[in-house]
Image (cartoon, helix red, strand yellow):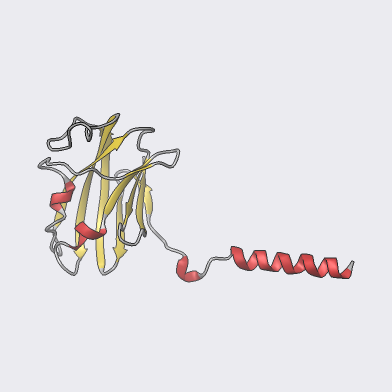
């Protein structure tokens, strides 16, 4: 009985230690609602980001032709970014990716387009103190977007989240 009790205590201790995440692994990414301005800090970048107006949209120019045409419903979000601190004007283009996430966990990657208001072009030159904006497009082939998540595509770090 004594060895059974000590074995159970050892297993409980291992489970408790294994379930505890180290303090360095916990990331406090801001979470808000559509229309909220969230402060994003990552890799020397500090930016105030606002996501608004997530809605169905028409096919923008240069979005693609079969087999790359939209599969189902095309959605877009309007994004405004105020560059508070950036090491160089083009760094946000490589470190910011806005994904459209569905209630079932699908994450749509942003699709490039030739639209004059596409965010991909605006963040190519965003010097410190500037405010840039544009639209991000997603091809929603299953469920529709319910959450917009800003991630660092290089590291996979979750930087911010806006819920509809």
Position of 155 relative to 59 (above/below): below
Total label count? 0
The residue shown at (23%, 33%) is 67
Position of 80 relative to 106 (above/below): below
Position of 162 relative to 154 (above/below): above
Q: Residue 38: x, y in percent?
A: 31, 55
The residue shown at (16%, 41%) is 113
Can you tell which quarter of the image residue 90 is in?
A: bottom left
Q: Residue 161: x, y in percent?
A: 36, 50
Is 144 left or right of 67, judged from the image as shown? right
The residue shown at (26%, 42%) is 52
What is the quadrant of the N terminus in the image? bottom right
What is the quadrant of the C terminus in the image? top left
Q: Residue 122: x, y in percent?
A: 13, 51
The residue shown at (11%, 58%) is 125
Q: Nearer the viewer, residue 61 or 98?
A: 61
């Amino acid at each position: 009985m004594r060895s059974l009790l000590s074995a159970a205590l050892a297993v409980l201790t291992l489970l408790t230690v294994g379930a505890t995440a180290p303090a360095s692994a916990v990331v406090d990414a801001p979470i808000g609602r559509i229309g909220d301005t969230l402060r994003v800090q990552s890799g020397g970048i500090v930016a105030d980001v606002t996501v608004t107006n997530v809605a169905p949209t028409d096919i923008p120019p240069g979005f693609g032709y079969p087999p790359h045409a939209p599969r189902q419903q095309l959605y877009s979000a309007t994004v405004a970014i105020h560059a508070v601190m950036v090491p160089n004007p083009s760094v946000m283009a490589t470190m910011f990716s806005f994904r459209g996430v569905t209630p079932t966990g699908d994450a749509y990657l942003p699709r490039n387009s030739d639209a004059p208001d596409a965010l991909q072009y605006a963040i190519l030159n965003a010097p410190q103190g500037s405010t840039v904006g544009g639209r991000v497009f997603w091809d929603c082939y299953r469920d529709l977007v319910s959450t917009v998540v800003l991630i660092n595509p290089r590291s996979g770090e979750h930087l911010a989240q806006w819920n509809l």
